[in-house]
């Protein structure tokens, strides 16, 4: 059974940073690209970033480019998302998923950016 468990969220002020983690199990992690998606209150799910199975290719939504960094550790079966220069509009629940649409995502971790 595929399991994805996100952690690392919290409440920060604008300009702050957080590092999100997603621990994966139940599948051959090193063979799959991984994605982060997010959902702001009252809004639809939004793709944020993706990384290839070997970690060499990374893509970002325009809204986070230059501020967020995705990475992975194929030994620890973990994908990360470093959030920097956070803005209030980054507030939301962040999920990891094998699918860029967010299908079969984990339970999510809450990020709140507020002064």
Image: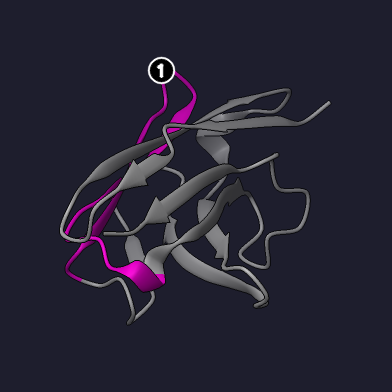
Q: Where does residue 77 sit, x and y in percent of width and height?
A: 49, 24
Q: Where does residue 107 sit, x and y in percent of width and height?
A: 70, 39
In the rendered image, the vertical position of residue 68 relative to residue 79, given as above or below: below
Which residue is outermost to the right? 1
Task: Name the image quarter holding the N terminus.
Answer: top right
Which residue is outermost to the bottom? 62
Estimate how packed mark 1 is, as few (under 14), some (14 to 19) or many (20 or more) residues with alpha carbons within 10 Å.
few
Quadrant in the picture for residue 8: top left
Residue wearing tag 1: 75
- Range drawn in magenta: 66-89
Q: Tell whether 58 sits left or right of 16.
A: right
Q: Tell whether 18 sits left or right of 9.
A: left
Foreground pick, 40 / 61: 40
Q: Where does residue 30 sit, x and y in percent of width and height?
A: 51, 32
Rendered image coloring scheme: one colour
Which residue is found at the position 70% from the left and 28% from the top?
A: 27
Which residue is found at the position 44% from the left and 59% from the top?
A: 50
Q: Is there any visible trace of residue 21 in the rendered image? A: yes
Q: Is there any visible trace of residue 52 in the rendered image? A: no
Q: Is residue 70 covered in magenta?
A: yes
Q: Where does residue 35 sit, x and y in percent of width and height?
A: 52, 55
Q: Tell whether 48 sits left or right of 2.
A: left
In the rendered image, the vertical position of residue 67 relative to residue 10, given as above or below: below
In terms of secondary structure, where does tag 1 sit?
A: loop
Q: How many marks?
A: 1
Task: Name the image quarter holding the C terminus.
Answer: bottom left
Foreground pick, 27 / 110: 110
Q: Is residue 99 covered in magenta?
A: no
Which residue is found at the position 45% from the left and 66% from the top?
A: 48
Which residue is outermost to the front? 115
């Amino acid at each position: 059974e595929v399991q994805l468990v996100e952690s690392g969220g919290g409440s920060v002020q604008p300009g702050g940073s957080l590092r999100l983690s997603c621990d994966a199990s139940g599948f051959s992690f090193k063979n799959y690209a991984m994605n982060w998606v997010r959902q702001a209150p009252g809004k639809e799910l939004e793709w944020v970033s993706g990384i290839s199975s070997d970690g060499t290719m990374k893509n970002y939504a325009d809204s986070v480019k230059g501020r967020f960094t995705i990475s992975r550790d194929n030994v620890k079966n973990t994908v990360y998302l470093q959030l920097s220069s956070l803005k209030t509009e980054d507030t939301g629940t962040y999920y990891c998923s094998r699918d860029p649409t967010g299908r079969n995502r984990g339970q999510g971790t809450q990020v709140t950016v507020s002064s």
